[in-house]
Image: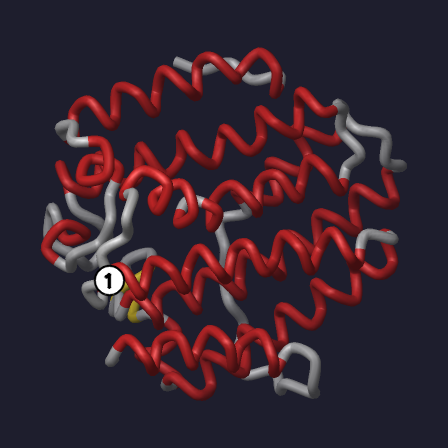
Amino acid sequence: MEWKKKIAALEAFYQKSFEQPRFVAEVPTSGSYAKKVRALSRLGRRSPQEVELLYQQVEHLRRAFKIMDDLIDEDTVRDGKPAFWVLHGAAATIEQAAWELKQARQLACQLGVELLFEQRLREVIEGARLEVELEAGWEPPDSVIAWFRVVQKECAFRLYIAEALLCPPEVCEAARQDGVAAQMLDDGLSALYGKDGRAENSDEKLGRLTYMRAFGVSAEKAVRRGRELKESIAPILGRKEG
C-alpha cells in the first residue's frame, strides 16, 4: 500500500467511528491490555463497576488498533493465522476498526472521560501517521524527537488507562514510560528475532525509525535499556519484573 493510502486509511478509520460503521467479524485479543486495567485498578480511584467499563473499552481499542496496525504495516500473519485484512479486505478492516472505536468512545462517555479519550486517541493516530511518513522517506530534523513522537502510539494508550483509572501522577508517568520501554524492546527484539510473519530486522529494511537508528545503538543495547527501564518503573506500577 502506497504511503498516502495508508494515511488516508488512518483518517478514514477515525472519521468513520463518528458515523455508523458496521460490524464485520469478531477480532480475538490476548487480553494483555485489559490485564493492565486490572493490575492498575488498585492504584486508582474507580469503582469496580467503572473498572469493568474501562476493561471493556480497552478491549475495543485493542481490537481496533490490532487490525489497523496489520493493515498499515501490511503484515499478513497475526497470531499464526491470516491477518484480518487478508481475510476481509482493507475496506472491511477499516469498517470493523471504526466500529470498535465507536464502542470505545461510547464507554468513554459513560466514564466521563470523553475529552481525555479523544486527546490520547489522536496522539496514537498521530504517532502512527508520523511512522508512515518516515517510512516514506521524510527525514526529520531530529531523529530522537521524531522517535519519541512515534512512540506516542504505545505511550498514549498506556497513559490513558492510568488516567482513566484516576491514578496518581507518578503512576500515570510510569505508565507512559512503560510505553517507551515497550517500543524499545519491540524495536530491538524485532531486529534480532523478527516478528510473526516477518523476517528479522524487517523494521530497518522497511526504513522505519527504530530506537537503534534514532539513538545510534545496537539492537542488543536497545533491548537492555528497555528491560532496565521496565525494571525501574515496576515498583511504581506494582509489578515484579525479571
Query: Where's residue 133, x and y in %?
Result: 31, 65
Residue at the spot x=55%, y=47% of the render?
31
Q: Nearer the viewer, residue 208 or 162?
A: 208
Q: In the figure, is residue 163 to the left or right of 86?
A: right
Describe the colour scheme in one phrase: secondary structure
Image coordinates of residue 29 in percent, x first then y, are: 50, 55
Q: Residue, x 39% and y 13% (percent of image)?
A: 242
Residue at x 31%, y 38% (from the top left corner):
144
Q: Amino acid at mark 1?
A: Trp
Q: Element under label 1?
A: loop
Of residue 224 and residue 148, the one placed in the foreground of this image is: 148
Q: Is residue 26 rendered to the left or right of residue 228?
A: right
Residue 134 horizontal/vertical position (percent):
27, 59
User: Which residue has dot 1 on it?
Assistant: 138
Residue 201 in the image: above or below residue 220? below
Q: Residue at x 28, y 58 (%)?
A: 80
Looking at the image, residue 105 lies above or below residue 90? above
